[in-house]
Amino acid sequence: MEEDSVFKEIESLKQMLHSGKAIPLSKFVAVDKDAFISKIDRIRELLPEEVKEAYLVSKRKNAILAQANEERDRILESAMVRRDEIVQDSDILEEAKKEKAKILNEARMEVEKMQKDAEDYVFKLLSKTQTILHKAQSVLEEGKKGLKYESPDSEHSE
């Protein structure tokens, strides 16, 4: 499973930090920069498609909503054109008004459904991403607990 591979790579990064050469008189360790960057790139490659999609969708949310609004406007314009065609015959004016209301209502309902579907899709992807990131955060927290140095912040928190 790719998710397991991501966590294995994160563990490998943690191990790289643990095995890095300590820099005297500091809390820092030296690691192979190229190897470290390579691991990060590997993690990026192994991220599930849902995470990548969620990232892209969240960046495109406004574009998706704008597209839904454009579709709504197109549908409304189409409805008005159709209404104008129907109204030309005065004998069916009442029927045209009813048809107009029906078309406008259907268009509004369709746009609302498209907007809801887009928001549901974004929400689901972001929820999956959140779950994956929580798991990654847990692994990182465990890694931090395993480090044998004291953060300067911990002196002030007690």
Image (tube, rainbow, N blue to C red):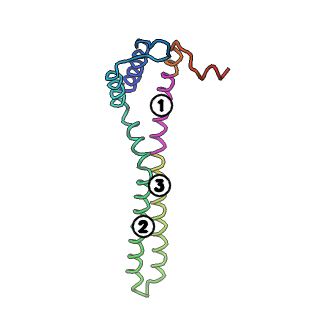
Given contact means CB atoms under 8 Å apart, are the residues at marks 1 and 3 in contact?
no
Across and down, in percent, residue 64 comes to 41, 53
Question: Where is 64 relative to 30, above or below?
Answer: below
Q: Which residues are magenta?
A: 122-140
The disc, 1 or 3, on the residue closer to the chain's N-terminal end is: 3
Given contact means CB atoms under 8 Å apart, are the residues at marks 2 and 3 in contact?
no
Q: Give the secondary structure at mark 2.
A: helix
The disc, 2 or 1, on the residue closer to the chain's N-terminal end is: 2
What's the residue type where badge 3 is placed? Gln
Across and down, in percent, residue 151 comes to 56, 19
Residue at the spot 49% in from the left edge and 18% down from the top edge: 143
Magenta region includes residue 83: no
What's the residue type where badge 1 is placed? Leu
Across and down, in percent, residue 26 comes to 49, 16
- Mark 1 packing: few (<14 Cα in 10 Å), some, or many (20+)? few
The disc, 2 or 3, on the residue closer to the chain's N-terminal end is: 2
Q: Is residue 25 left or right of residue 71?
A: right
Residue 115: image tag: 3
Residue 133: image tag: 1
Residue at the spot 44% in from the left edge and 45% down from the top edge: 58
Question: Where is 125 relative to 89, above or below?
Answer: above
Residue at the spot 49% in from the left edge and 43% down from the top edge: 123
Task: Name the dominant secondary structure of the magenta segment.
Answer: helix
What's the residue type where badge 2 is placed? Asp
> Which of label 2 and label 1 is nearer to you?
1
- Mark 3 packing: few (<14 Cα in 10 Å), some, or many (20+)? some
